Image (cartoon, helix red, strand yellow):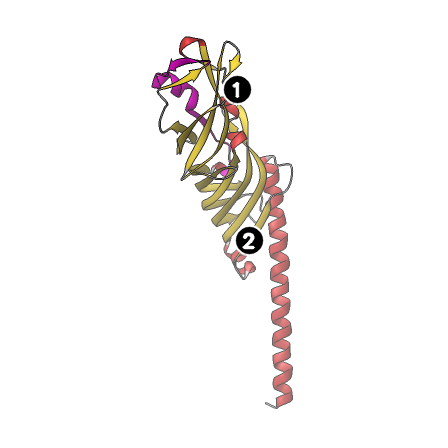
Amino acid sequence: MSKRAVRILLTTVVILGGLCVGADRLAVGFAEDEVAEKLRTSEGLGEKPDVSIKGFPFLTQVAGGTLDDVEIGIQDYEATSGSDKIRIADLNARMQGVEFSGDYSSATAEKATGTARISYDELLKEAQGEPPVELPLGATGKVVGLSDGGNGKIKVEVEVSKGGTKLPKPVHVLSSVKVENDTIKVNADEIPKKFEVMGVSIPLPEGLVRDVTDFEEKVGGLPGGIKIDEVTPAEDGVDVSVKGANVKLAG
């Protein structure tokens, strides 16, 4: 074969390869848009989520009926918390082994893992809706704020009042946080034995004070039935890991 023929052959291979890659990327773009729209509809989202289908070539995955790896990002997702809602600021999930129908009307992932961020204000919503807890000597206590306590702890801010007068400074306790049965639970590590209110020393029975400091927030209704798994305090909220099996993305 002459050098000219070899050059022509190589040029043809390169052009065909480029066309194949281009067709593959066009197809994956179309599929990402379809999955995003189906997910928006099935989850009642205000906007399309970010959908990224990984792996190359895409068309061979389509032929097999299973996508290896799909990443999904949703902003401001409204999960359920009892009869109320709790806002997830950022929800990012990686779906693996996604089986789908030809028109993407149904899609189910073999397994899913991901992360979510819940602000401290959102985490505190249910506790703030409760009335103040009555303490000894006519005092009352109520949780009014949460913040990062460092070393994996949450700092819980408690407002104490007596006779309608608030304590000049709130009481702070460091609390541990965990996930149990789809519920984020916040429990004080140590309860103060007493504190001073207007020159009066008020004893603090631990069980009574925990009615103030300890609280929980159930988090359900996440996309496709994924569940919260672990929780870690951060600067402006808690980072939550999520996971699931046989997660339905659509259909």
From the top left corner, tell me how far across and down residue 181 is, in percent. Answer: 39, 30
Query: Quadrant of residue 22 in the image?
Result: bottom right
Going from N to C along the chain, the mark reached first, 2 or 1, is 2
Identify the residue under disc 1: 129
Identify the residue under disc 2: 53
Identify the residue shown where x is 59% and y is 40%. Answer: 75
State the extent of the magenta-drawn residues as a range. Answer: 198-224
Toward the viewer: 143 or 251? 143
Residue 101 lies left or right of residue 112; in this view the side is: right
Residue 17 lies left or right of residue 163; in this view the side is: right
Find the distance from the CA under tag 2 to the CA under tag 1.
Answer: 42 Å
Identify the residue shown where x is 60% and y is 61%. Answer: 24
Toward the viewer: 57 or 176? 176
From the top left corner, tell me how far across and down residue 147 is, in percent. Answer: 49, 33
Identify the residue shown where x is 61% and y is 76%. Answer: 13
- Work out whether residue 250 can be spotted: no
Label 2 with label 1: CB-CB less than 8 Å? no
Numbered circles on residues, count = 2
Whether 60 is drawn above or below 82: the answer is: below
Task: Say which amino acid is labelled 1.
Answer: Gly
Q: Quadrant of the N terminus?
A: bottom right
Task: Say which amino acid is labelled 2.
Answer: Ile
